[in-house]
Image: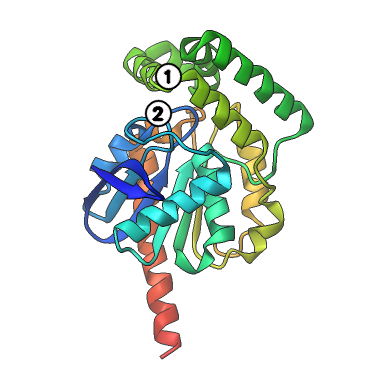
Amino acid sequence: MQATIDDRRVGYDAVGSGVPLLLLHAFPLNRTMYAEQTQGLRDAARVITFDLPGVGRSEPGPLSVDGMADLAAGLLDALQIPRAIIGGVSMGGYAAMAFARRHPERLLGLVLANTRAAADSEEAREGRAEMAKVARDQGPSAIAERMLPKLLGPTALKRNRKLVDRVRAMIEGVPGEVISDLLTALAERADSTPSLAAIDVPTLVIASEDDAVTPASEAREWAQEIPESRYVEIPGVGHLSNLEAPTEFNKAVRSFLETAILFHDGAATATR
């Protein structure tokens, strides 16, 4: 499906019924990374996924992490959804935290998986700039070669060739110039750490034991800054936990959905 947001076509999927759950995709993938969540959670939520500008079925456009959050809000407008649970893996988590800063009145909850609250260090920004040049000069296949050992855990890399090929195909489907622009957006994103304590909705933080990109030890620390947070660590998987361990990931989200609904039902009752 496609929606027109700010005069640009955005490719999206929306399936199931229940509380709206909008998931933003990781770098440098697309909305199909959530196929297992779309199918596995459709009986518990209205699962919404979309492609960022220049990715998949979405038209190119300006890229920033704040802009990703605003695009998510625009899609909710197009679907006539006033409030939703917003979530994402990795880059999608950065955008979900930006959504919490920019559109807090529209939040029912947050799902922050394999991500971090802090902005990039100077060293990380330099690394992204170097990788952006590779994307422009050598294309997405070169990025796939670099990214796969970081995105997937050792077990998946050795034993799950189907998943490796799937992730590679997603990366190679993103134009090199879009990958470059996404890297710039990631390097320029704001630090969400100071705003964590202001998040007043239920929040699920998911980390992975073998995540080399956003270590679980770091996630445990910043998750404690969010008043209504729940921390779940999935053993034996890497950075893309929803792809490597979809059953465990979906179980954590399904349990959290019930908590978020009860939280808001209780708040509504208290204000009557």
Label 1: few (<14), some (14–19) or many (≥20) C-alpha neighbours in 10 Å: many
The amino acid at mark 2 is Glu
Residue 244 - label: 2
Above or below residue 265? Residue 144 is: above
Quarter of the figure that contains the N terminus: top left
Nearer to the camera, 80 or 243: 80
Query: Circle 1 sits on which residue?
Result: 156
- Residue at the far front: name it: 7
Nearest to the observer: residue 183 or residue 47: 183
Q: Position of residue 35 (x, y in %)?
A: 29, 35
Q: Indicate the amino acid at tag 1.
A: Ala
94 vs 27: above or below:
below
Q: Is residue 227 among what the camera can see?
A: yes
Q: Residue at x 64, y 65 (%)?
A: 198
Label 2–label 1 contact, CB within 8 A: yes
Q: Residue at x 38, y 71 (%)?
A: 262
**Quadrant in the rendering for residue 33:** top left
Q: Quadrant of residue 119?
A: top right
Residue 233 appears in the rendering: no
